[in-house]
């Protein structure tokens, strides 16, 4: 059985900032009626799982305004207009964690919230890391953590790691580590 697709009749931009575009589409539904769909339009995101030579992983603790709490996460950020996923991954690893990597592997990708955004997040595993000065922007402050895979698992189970992007990426990446 093939599910019926929706037809886009029109699309308008409600608001744009440097990270996303908020859109409203008018659609024709499979039953024939018209409807509106509001969503976040994105160029995608790149998430990096940095692996040290001993097999431990680098995560970042940062403050998340919407939840008003700190969050332990892998380096991740949006792909900018005209930028590739690969370039975004390298930029995020440098800006957030202060590393460059010589070895990269794509572990997979996922959509973080398919009812709200068209974003796809590509997951990279980065190895052969070299430290350099992090260059985060004014909206970001990071505390670097190094954890073993079993410690990541335990922190997910206990709720210490609660970020959905990190949990989804770890689920996909852990078998490639």
Image (spheres, rainbow, N blue to C red):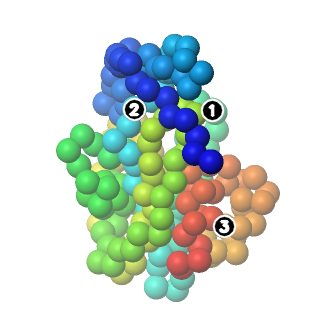
Residue at 29%, 61% in the rendered image: 86
Residue at 33%, 78% in the rendered image: 103
| Crowd tier of the residue under label 2, counting other residues whose Cα lies within 10 Å: few below 14, some 14–19, many 20 or above | some
Location of residue 104 in the rendering, given as x and y in whole percent from the top left corner: 35, 74
Question: Where 55 falls versus 15 (above or below)?
Answer: below
Q: CA distance from mark 3 to mark 2?
A: 31 Å
> Are discs 1 and 3 less than 8 Å apart at CB?
no
- Left or right position of 106 against 37: left
Location of residue 97 in the rendering, given as x and y in whole percent from the top left corner: 40, 60
> Are discs 3 and 2 less than 8 Å apart at CB?
no
Of label 2 and label 1, which has the lower sequence position?
Answer: 2
Instruction: Evaluate whether residue 73 shows in this view.
Output: no
- Describe the element under mark 1 as helix, strand or loop: loop
Q: Which residue is under mark 3?
A: 152
Identify the mark at residue 68; answer none if there is no mark: 1
Location of residue 54 in the rendering, given as x and y in whole percent from the top left corner: 52, 86
- Mark 2 vs mark 1: give the one in front: 2
> Are discs 2 and 1 less than 8 Å apart at CB?
no
Q: Which residue is under mark 2?
A: 41
- Left or right position of 70 against 25: right
- Left or right position of 139 against 133: right
- Describe the element under mark 3 as helix, strand or loop: helix
Q: CA distance from mark 2 to mark 1?
A: 25 Å
Residue at 64%, 33% in the rendered image: 67
Quarter assignment of residue 171 = bottom right
Residue at 34%, 67% in the rendered image: 99
- Mark 3 vs mark 2: give the one in front: 2
Of label 1 and label 3, which has the lower sequence position?
Answer: 1
């Amino acid at each position: 059985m093939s599910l019926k697709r929706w037809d886009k009749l029109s699309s308008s931009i409600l608001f744009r900032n440097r990270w996303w575009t908020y859109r409203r589409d008018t659609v024709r539904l499979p039953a024939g009626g018209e409807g509106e769909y509001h969503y976040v339009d994105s160029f995608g995101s790149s998430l990096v799982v940095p692996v040290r030579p001993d097999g431990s992983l680098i995560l970042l603790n940062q403050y998340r305004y919407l939840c008003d709490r700190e969050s332990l996460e892998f380096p991740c950020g949006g792909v900018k207009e005209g930028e590739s996923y690969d370039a975004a991954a390298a930029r995020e690893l440098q800006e957030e964690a202060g590393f460059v990597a010589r070895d990269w592997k794509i572990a997979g990708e996922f959509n973080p919230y398919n009812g709200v955004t068209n974003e796809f997040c590509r997951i990279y595993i980065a190895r052969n890391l070299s430290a350099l000065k992090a260059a985060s922007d004014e909206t970001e402050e990071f505390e670097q953590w190094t954890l073993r895979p079993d410690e990541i698992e335990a922190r997910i189970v206990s709720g210490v790691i609660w970020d959905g992007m990190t949990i989804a990426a770890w689920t996909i990446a852990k078998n490639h580590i």
